[in-house]
């Protein structure tokens, strides 16, 4: 099997199954299958687990670039779209559980929550921002948008910050877990900042050097 | 009539002061063996067969008609940060917590002060069962059949002086026994307080049991407070100190986040938590899509307690 085949027939299906595992586990818990349980408040458990799983996939998506650079595995990029779509999938589930099972379709409360509760406002914003990214995740859209696709998908940085902030803000007191998410996100974004600085400096060096070379050659010619 | 606790014949019941002083009953397998013999099989939703029964009388005057939550729900869904911050942490981490010997220090503005053993505290206090609503500040609620006695009849024993304006309660601080206290999520020990008239109110209960059995560790054993018209965090658990004070006690949650948690913490659907609404609540254990219900002013106890706050701005004194 070549790399393309390995990704197509082995790695991608594995990631797909792994991505569905949290959902399967939650469904087992909801019905009490295989000894799984969602505890005394299944609604909150579903809501929180879907939200956290969405954040997990968001961070995994953001980890693809650093990992492929560091481990020199450029082909990892082939898994990124699926990871991102799972983040979207669990974010939608999280929102659905909140609206249907938690608020019990009380639309006026939903409106008030989004307008008045800052942590819900930012969580909802993050969800809305994910929609265009999911919608433009196809090969056709990538081709059609060209360079603008990359700019559009940089939104994921904003989304991840909003998502972790949303988590941090809704915790009553024990913020250790959201802080861990924040630290990982800072690492993933920090890596990009440092790398782009280094790249900019290298570019500047190269330009300077090539200019110097050019003028040297020019003076030789004179 | 709501679903009720299975009744136990009086002959099968150990009087509470005898039970509480009977050390042998409290150690491991022997205790389980002995008390199992003395009890009928546990009914679904009730306490397990090995739980130690208490002698009590039901007090319908102070009981709501709503169906109580299952014993399992009341004992696995706990906010008791001394044993961990997840809801299911206390039921796991408090399993081996020893509540004997236990003593309560009484001090401050009272004529009678000193250390009292738990047996002393319980002496001469007939136990009663009251089915109360329990509303957490996190907007979930339970209905619990507590077993206890009015705080007022305990406090009267210590003859508070005219300078006693408030009562302050303190939870045990022992990080070796309460692992959650090794993490500084709150400023330990946990402290709560009531105004004297709130403390003396007939609804305010000192609790030693639920569902007719001795209070499980994760629910605040051996002695906890229940103030049914206030958010759950006011109902302090595992009490080791009661102090009468002239000034308002500095309570743990009010210190941790003064803009979010006040000293009064009366259940009030019109005064929101800064980060979430208090207008409605979700009843634990209720069926899917039928769990959310409107929150009642003073948790439905307005007829009994609203007069305590006459003329007070409940928005300011939240």
Image: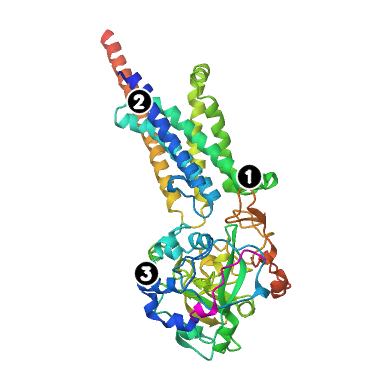
Q: Of the two numbered discs 2 and 1 on the same chain, state the one appearing first in sequence.
A: 2
Q: Report whether mark 2 lies on the same chain as mark 1.
A: yes
**Distance CA(mark 3)–CA(mark 2):** 50 Å
Residues A35 and B169: in front is A35
> The magenta stretch spans which residues?
B1-14
Which residue lies at the image location 53% right of the left edge and 60% below the top edge?
Answer: B44
Q: Quadrant of the N terminus of chain A?
A: top left
| Residue farthest toward the top in the current orientation of the protein | A221
Residue topped by disc 3: B177
Q: Is mark 3 on a helix, strand or loop?
A: loop
Residue topped by disc 2: A10
Residue B4 drawn in magenta = yes
- Nearest-to-viewer mark from 3 and 1: 3
- Nearest-to-viewer mark from 3 and 2: 2
**Distance CA(mark 3)–CA(mark 1):** 42 Å
Residue topped by disc 1: A114
Residue B189 drawn in magenta = no
Left or right of residue A10, residue A179 in this image: right
Return the mark for residue B96.
Answer: none
Q: Mark 1 lies on which chain?
A: A
**Distance CA(mark 2)–CA(mark 1):** 42 Å
């Amino acid at each position: 099997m070549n790399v393309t085949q390995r990704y197509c027939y082995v790695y991608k299906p594995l990631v797909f199954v792994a991505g569905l595992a949290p959902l399967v586990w939650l469904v087992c818990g909801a019905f009490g299958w295989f000894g799984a349980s969602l505890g005394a408040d299944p609604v909150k458990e579903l809501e929180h687990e879907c939200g956290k799983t969405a954040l997990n996939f968001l961070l995994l998506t953001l980890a693809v670039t650093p990992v492929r650079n560091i481990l020199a595995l450029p082909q990892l990029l082939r898994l990124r779209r699926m990871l991102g779509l799972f983040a979207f999938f669990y974010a939608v589930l999280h929102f659905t559980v909140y609206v249907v099972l938690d608020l019990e379709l009380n639309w006026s409360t939903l409106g008030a929550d989004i307008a008045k509760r800052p942590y819900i406002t930012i969580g909802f914003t993050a969800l809305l921002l994910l929609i265009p990214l999911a919608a433009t995740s196809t090969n056709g859209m990538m081709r059609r948008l060209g360079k603008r696709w990359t700019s559009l998908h940089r939104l994921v940085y904003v989304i991840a910050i909003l998502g972790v902030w949303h988590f941090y803000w809704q915790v009553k007191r024990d913020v250790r877990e959201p802080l861990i998410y924040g630290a990982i996100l800072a690492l993933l974004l920090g890596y990009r900042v440092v790398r782009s600085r280094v790249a900019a400096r290298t570019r500047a060096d190269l330009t300077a050097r090539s200019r110097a070379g050019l003028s040297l050659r020019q003076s030789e010619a004179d | 009539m709501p679903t009720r606790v299975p009744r136990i014949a009086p002959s099968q019941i150990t009087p509470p002061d005898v039970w509480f002083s009977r050390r042998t009953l409290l150690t491991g397998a022997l205790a389980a063996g002995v008390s199992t013999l003395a009890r009928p099989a546990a009914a679904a939703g009730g306490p397990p067969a090995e739980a130690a029964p208490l002698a009590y009388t039901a007090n319908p005057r102070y009981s709501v008609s709503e169906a109580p939550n299952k014993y399992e729900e009341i004992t696995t869904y706990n906010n008791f940060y001394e044993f961990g911050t997840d809801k299911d942490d206390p039921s796991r981490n408090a399993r081996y917590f020893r509540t004997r010997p236990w003593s309560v220090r009484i001090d401050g503005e009272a004529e009678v002060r000193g250390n009292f053993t738990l047996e002393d505290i319980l002496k001469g206090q007939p136990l009663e069962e009251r089915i109360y609503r329990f509303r957490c500040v996190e907007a979930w609620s339970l209905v619990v059949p507590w077993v206890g006695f009015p705080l007022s009849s305990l406090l009267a024993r210590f003859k508070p002086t005219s300078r006693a304006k408030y009562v302050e309660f303190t939870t045990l601080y022992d990080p070796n026994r309460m692992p959650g206290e090794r993490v500084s999520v709150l400023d330990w020990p946990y402290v709560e307080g009531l105004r004297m008239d709130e403390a003396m109110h007939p609804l305010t209960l000192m609790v030693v049991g639920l569902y007719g059995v001795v209070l499980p560790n994760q629910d605040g054993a051996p002695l906890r407070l229940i103030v049914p018209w206030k958010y759950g965090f006011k109902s302090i658990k595992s009490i080791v100190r009661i102090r009468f004070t002239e000034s308002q006690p500095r309570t743990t949650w009010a210190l941790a986040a003064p803009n979010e948690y006040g000293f009064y913490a009366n259940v009030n659907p019109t005064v929101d938590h800064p980060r979430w609404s208090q207008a409605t609540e979700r009843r634990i254990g209720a069926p899917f899509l039928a769990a959310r219900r409107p929150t009642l002013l003073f948790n439905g106890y307005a007829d009994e307690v609203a007069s305590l706050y006459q003329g007070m701005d409940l928005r300011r004194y939240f």
